[in-house]
Image (tube, coloured by chain):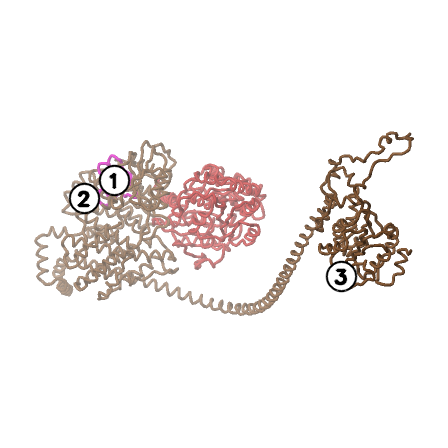
Chain colours: A red, B brown
Amino acid sequence: MMRILYIVHQFLPEFATGTERVTMNIARTQQRNGHSVDVLTCSMRGPSYWHGEERGLRLAAVEGLRIFALPRELFGNATEFGMDSSAKAASIISKFFNRNTYDVVHVMHPMRMLDAIDIIASRAIPYIITLTDFFALCWRINLKRLDASFCDGPKGGRACNSLCVDHLATHDRLASRLHRLTAVMSNATDIVACSDFVAEVFRREYPDLTIRVRGHGVELPLYEPAMRRNNQNSIVFGYIGTLSEAKGIHVLIEAFKYAEVEARLEIVGSSYGNDEFLARLHALSGPGVRIHDAIEHRDIPRALKSYDIFCLPSLVPETFSLALHEGFAAGLPALVSDTGWPAREVETAACGKTVPVGDVKAWSEAIRDIVRHPDMLGQWQNNIPLQARIEEESFFYDQLYRRASSNAAVF
Amino acid sequence: MKTLDQITSDHREKVADKWASYIREYEHLFAPFRDEPVAILEVGVQNGGSLELWGEYFARATVVVGCDIDPACESLQFKTDRIHVVTGDANTAQCARRIAAISQSFDIIIDDGSHTSRDIIALFSRYFGLLKDDGLYVVEDLHCSYWKDYEGGLFYPYSSTSFLKALTDILNHEHWGIPRQRRELLIKYSDHYGVDFDEDVLAHIHSITFFNSLCVIQKANHRSGGLGRRRVTGNEANVYGEILPLMGSKSVSPDQEMEPWTRYAFSSEEQLISRINELDMSRHELERRIEELSQSLLGGAGQLDALRTTLAARDDELDKLRNALSARDGELDELRTALRARDGALESFGQRLAATTGEVLTLRRALTMREGQMAEYANRSALLDRLLASRSMRMTRPFRFVGRLLRGEWSLVLAGLRSTLGRYPSIAGVIARAAAMIRNPKAALRSLTMRHIVRAANMMRGRPPPQFISLESGSRLRHNSSFMTIVHLAKLFNARNARKAITYLRSGQLRLLLARARDLFIQTKSTHSSCSPSRDDGYLTSHPELTSAPKPLLDTVVSVVIPTYNGGPEFYWLIRKLRQQKGLRGIEIIVVDSGSTDDTTIVAGTLGCKVICIPKAQFSHSFSRNRGAEEARGDLLLFTVQDAHPIGDYWLYGLALCLLQPRGEGRLTAVSCTEYSRYDSEVLYDALINTHYNFLACRDRDRVGVFIGGTQIELRTQGQLSDVACLIHRDVFDKYKFEGRYAEDLTLGIRLIRDGHRIAMLSSIPVIHSHRRPADYYLRRVFVDVLFLADIFPDFVFPQLDSIQGALIAASTLYKALPKVMPSVDVSPDQALRLVIKKLQRWTPPNTNEHLREQEDFGFPPFGSWVARVAGTTRNMNPASVEQSVSRFKAAFLGRLSELESYIGGVYSTLDGSLTSEINDAVEKTLAMTLGAQIAFLYLAVKSGTHIDADSGLVMEVRDLLVEGV
């Protein structure tokens, strides 16, 4: 039995987006297999979400997991993006580690939590880091520069210094951040990327580091074998996930409207308080478009079952997209932006279509094309790859934890 | 002789009414007839004045007939009998006959009737035939034909003037150049007014003379009429000489047959009329439609007005609602103000509450500490009780007694005597037992249990005694590797096994023993120094996907055998996952289905599996798997279950590699996987599987099983295979096959190791599998497990129970008394469960059999029915036996709960709603498991003949009930 701590930039009960759900899945499965598990995160949305506070940390329990959260108000924006440290936060975390011992720590996302990782390293607690996005390389997280163009990597910080400097990200801070995150990467017992797409970018920056690749698992038993769609019914295009500008939902809705087809578009998700964007989506939507609130993750298979194709119109390069893979588990082919890992997956497996990112006209034409030729859906469906289960991903990490917490090499 | 004008001027009798121009023209027209004996007809008499004028002017006239529609004219009296008046409508046949009765023909006919076009034309058609040749037909007052009231109009095609004009064409009939009758030209009048014209009469028209408002048609004999012959006179034709030969010739009209203006059936005017009529009809239709639309519009306007009215009413209501809303807003503002005031008060209360809560928390922590101390005391007390009740204590009691005697501890001696006398029926028993022990000290030494030896060994190492979990199946250790070491040590020190110990030492097992002893000490050290698990490398292999080592193709084919029954979606995913396995030359999947009612067989067939269907009644774990293996063609056989799921795409490759190319020494015959619990598993299952794998020594390592001895512990720990996933050489399996109705995997493993094979349980390459089962499943499962252990292992020791009623009363009353764990942020999950255990420790059973009648059936109604039958036998209950059984049941149940508490304490730190629910379920299921075990012990006792009473028959019956479906 091991004592495992998960560190993640945000978590339930406040947020339940992809990374949080992946963390929950892994942690719960470790617990099911006899390990003691806690989560250390950052509280972004105030104390009302939490059961109490103890020694500077907010506390909650979700599905048998004990969650400790560092209040966000303790530190500034520079600390959030890893460009600075917070003495107050570091002090609270240090005391936390005095009270709680762990055999291994799993860093699911280092944003806002670099002070904690520094303390872990200083105490020689072995840790594993999973790269779910590009935060460790890019303070803007998604490799999208200040001028909105895409970046192919920081190139040892030179690209950041020339293209992404602003009042927050000064030259000094960028240098400090690079130094700090390089140490975080180097000190990790294992580094795991959620996709080849992420691994390749990091390998370019850190050619000496071994970066494993392990995709996220889905709760496969919840999904029934996919059925062939009835061609008599109008096609249902669907999206489940966060409703944010970066996800390109507005592009999808506009494109659907311009396509003027006999079909439906179902959007499910939370804007996490961004009411302005939500209002914009509602204003954009027309006939056939329905926007629903977020649903429990147990209800996602049922929602996906009512779709014919999953849409992922992200404006930034997605590194994995759990929702897309849940769509695959439900037997849904995909219509995705031609950037990031989803595009490569869809093209490799021929289980959907890629569309130029942010191009309303092209998305509109793609939607029309599918409505005109619904048989394509069946062909794509045949090519959908089998998805890994949560337990497969968890076992993979279980083995890494054993290795990290043991002097003897397991393999 | 007076002129007509003078006669008219001088006329003083009946009033006559003629236009001056008429008189002037008549003077010339009638002059040729004045002295002739003429007959005159005038239609339109009025006062009769004109008849008197005609009588005077035509002095020689034979008759002057007047006709008028006015009956008053009947009374007109004239001085001369030449004047006749006929009253009636001249356009009727009757009137015409009366006129004709007066005179057959007339020289002059004057139409001064109604002046309507209809009457003028009809009169002409009727009376022109009565006119003598050379006679005159006069129509007066034609100005009326331009007036609508007289059916006229300047361009009206059916006016009397129009008709009279048409007669000019009749007059020139001979020049038409087309063979068409005269009457045809008048057909429009015929059609319009319903009159008919005689062709021959029309041919008599000689001339037509129009005057102002007057028309005179002269009749002549048609044979004398016409253009006549050409008269050319004179002799000089210097300009146009060709004229001369025409002298005396007749007029010849050129053929106009083809000329459009001639050959038309109707004149352009008639066509125009037709079109006008059509247009008129259309106009009328349009007018009708317009009228209808106007009506509709009026109706619509009415509706619109109604809607406007409704809208106005709604506006009024809306205004009223707005006013009401404004009033409510006002009230809301007031309420908000009040609420803010309350918020302030609440905040104040909150602050006070926070202060109070702090104090409460402090007190609660103190209380928790006290409770912990009390629990510790209770545990120690229970331990002491068990120790005092143990066989060793009982057996060594005489020695202690003698020791105390020798040491002169008289008070203890007396207490011991009292206790002994209370325990045994007589002093004779004590003496008899002591004598027996003195007679056979070796037997007494052998009666020392493994537990005593282990405890002694641990005490020698200065380590706290390992936590024994009291299980009915014997003694089971939590730290299995320690346990096995101690087992070996015990063997060495046990006189009965001395020969075997020497055999071990000789056969090289000493090294294994020493290694295990080393493991024990390493583990002990590790356990005490940190919370990490064992750090030694106890793995035979590793999952291929965790290494970067190349994965060359294994030249082997694996046949996968899966028994199925209603496999559901998970079966589909399993088959797809198996199909995706890589690194092997081939994989075939054989599905043995025992009557699925869902689409399991369809899925299997669709995904390329070989499907064998067997009747449900034929199913047993052994039969179905053996049947599948018979069909297999692979080199290796993999037995798995329908709800398992391989980890990764090289899972089967990893198992096969371990079997074919094992790391370390020795060939393996079969390998099984440990189960990797699912995301949606349950805490009880996780705890049980954890205990089981600790027992097998494969929790954190791979275990190689070999034959080390024939005790049930040795065989179970070494021989365990698992059909959740078990890979075996086909040639070996064909020799052994599965046997038995259940635990076929364990018996196969035991048979293999007995024959010198080596088998392995791998935790390095596990398989995803776990269950969420209802309470009744646990009850039946434990029952079957105990029966199986007793069946397979002759040395399986089970406790003696005296009363089935006692066990059922204990289960029933405990079920009702089970305290519930509640969610709490202040209590850890194991603390909460410990509180439950503490409360249950204080529980005492009520001394009534009423509870048996309310026995819980654990969700298994047939079991409830059986219990009801047992309840009917309560009159046979022996109170002492019942009490003993209840006590044993409680101890067994609490032992199991302690084990669960230990597991939960190691894994869970916080008690939220979902875990609370799971723990409460787990406690109920643990109770069911305890009951299943107790019933099994009694069943075994009855079966072996060591327990016979009135309930024995009932106990035997329960077997089939509980075994079914497990």
Q: Magenta region: which residues?
A: B714-740
Q: Is label 3 in a helix, a strand or a loop? A: loop
At label 3, counting other C-alpha atoms closer than 10 Å, the crowd grade (few under 14, some 14-19, many 20 or more) is: some
Q: Is residue B669 magenta?
A: no
Q: Could you tell me the amino acid type at mark 2?
A: Gly
Residue identified by numbered label 3: B70
Residue B310 versus residue B481: which sits nearer the camera?
B310
Mark 3 belongs to chain: B
- The dot on residue B626 is 1
Q: Could you tell me the amino acid type at mark 3?
A: Asp
Residue B32 shows up from this direction: yes
Q: Is label 2 in a helix, a strand or a loop? A: loop
Mark 1 belongs to chain: B
> Is the N terminus of chain B in the top left, top right, bottom left or bottom right quadrant?
bottom right
Asked whether disc 1 touches disc 3, contact meaning CB atoms under 8 Å apart, the reply is no
User: Disc 3 versus disc 2: distance between alpha carbons?
Assistant: 152 Å
Depth check, mark 1 against mark 2: the one in front is 1
Asked whether disc 3 touches disc 2, contact meaning CB atoms under 8 Å apart, the reply is no
**For the point 16% across and 57% down, which residue is it?**
B952
Q: Is residue B725 magenta?
A: yes
Looking at the image, is mark 3 or mark 2 earlier in the sequence? 3
At label 1, counting other C-alpha atoms closer than 10 Å, the crowd grade (few under 14, some 14-19, many 20 or more) is: many
Residue A389 versus residue B515: which sits nearer the camera?
A389
Residue A61 versus residue B793: which sits nearer the camera?
B793
Looking at the image, is mark 1 or mark 2 earlier in the sequence? 1
- Same subunit, labels 3 and 2: the answer reads yes
Task: Determine whether B808 is above or below B232 in the image.
Answer: below
Q: Position of residue B661 (x, y in %)?
A: 30, 34
Residue identified by numbered label 2: B710
Q: Could you tell me the amino acid type at mark 1?
A: Asn
Residue B510 shows up from this direction: no
